[in-house]
Image: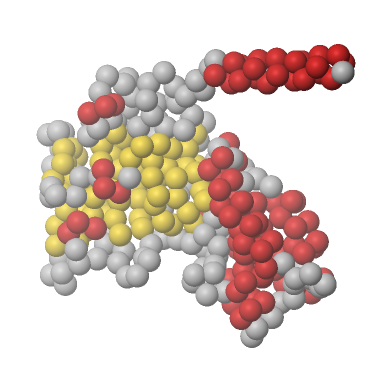
Amino acid sequence: MRQLACLIALLLCAAGTTRAENDASPDLESPRERIVLQVKDFVHDRRTLGDGAWEIEKFQTEDGLWRARLRVDGVVRESYGDCGEREDWMRFLVWPDSVPDAAGLDLPRMLFVLRYGGGANGREHLNIVDLDHDYRSLFATQGAFNFRRMEDLDDDGRLEVIGSSRRFEGVLDLSANDSPYPVIVLSYDGEAGRYLCQTDRFPYESEEAIARFETAFELNRPVDRKVPFAPDDASVHERQFAPLVRWAVELCYAGRTDEAWRLLEASCTPEAARIARDAIASILAEERYYQELIGNVQESQ
């Protein structure tokens, strides 16, 4: 009896110590509060933005579409299109100048030009320009992109861009709703001198999506067989195959490609695993963000 009492006391002591350690755990965030910027934080109700040396202006063409142009000392340096018929689909933001909470940060100013292409669940386009170093381009999307938010994830003072790639839309006969849209995190790379996809540096950004698709698949995993490639059978293709493919693609963009291939081999029939892997690998071989992730960085965007 005495031994049992001692054991209980030890367990309670250990639990109390653990709670105390957790309560006293250091704050892993930066001493300053992180700033999170979303679409609503971009300037959308002004047609011009600038400081005299440069100016970005949005304007409407004869066909009713909105565009923008960046002028430096009165000369057009860059033009931006890919926008629809609504003026507020073209938005600007200067970091850190446009954000009051960022005042005092000793950082180069960056101009973010965000525009929506129109249509249901349409694509978005983003350009980032270094305003303090000859207005050079730091990033330009190539169409298959959706914007989610911007946040300084690594506390270096520069914003990361969190979005998703649309290159897998319609892959493997999946509907737009069931297609993979993997999370991508764009972060400034000092050696390259521009923003590159570095999602694997921020694995927590992919964890929620990975867990969601894993759960969706496990809820519908067949008990007595592996998942076939059966696009004509909606109950299999949408409820079993689709979440499995989305899970695998998210793993690839989290830097865990080998794990993705093992997942397909373990869960699919040999034929379905081969078809899925070939289709995914074919896109990965040409997809800009994944190629940047594995170190294949193009000289220019």
Q: Position of residue 272 (x, y in %)?
A: 75, 73
Residue at 79% across, 63% down: 265
Vertical placement of residue 118 versus 90, above or below: below
Q: Give the number of marks.
A: 0
Relative horizontal placement of residue 158, taking residue 117 as reference (left or right):
right
Is residue 135 at least partly visible in the picture?
no
Which quarter of the picture shows residue 61? bottom left
Which quarter of the picture shows residue 151? top left
Residue at 65% across, 56% down: 214
Residue at 69% across, 80% down: 230
The extreme front residue here reads 1
Relative horizontal placement of residue 142, taking residue 171 as reference (left or right):
left
Q: Position of residue 68 (x, y in %)?
A: 21, 54
Vertical placement of residue 29 versus 81, above or below: above
Relative horizontal placement of residue 269, taking residue 94 as reference (left or right):
right
Quadrant in the picture for the N terminus: top right
Is residue 219 at least partly visible in the picture?
yes
Vertical placement of residue 50 versus 62, above or below: above
Which quarter of the picture shows residue 234? bottom right
Q: Position of residue 120 (x, y in %)?
A: 35, 70
Relative horizontal placement of residue 38, taking residue 239 as reference (left or right):
left
Q: Position of residue 243 (x, y in %)?
A: 62, 64
Residue at 49% across, 44% down: 185
Vertical placement of residue 190 versus 60, above or below: above
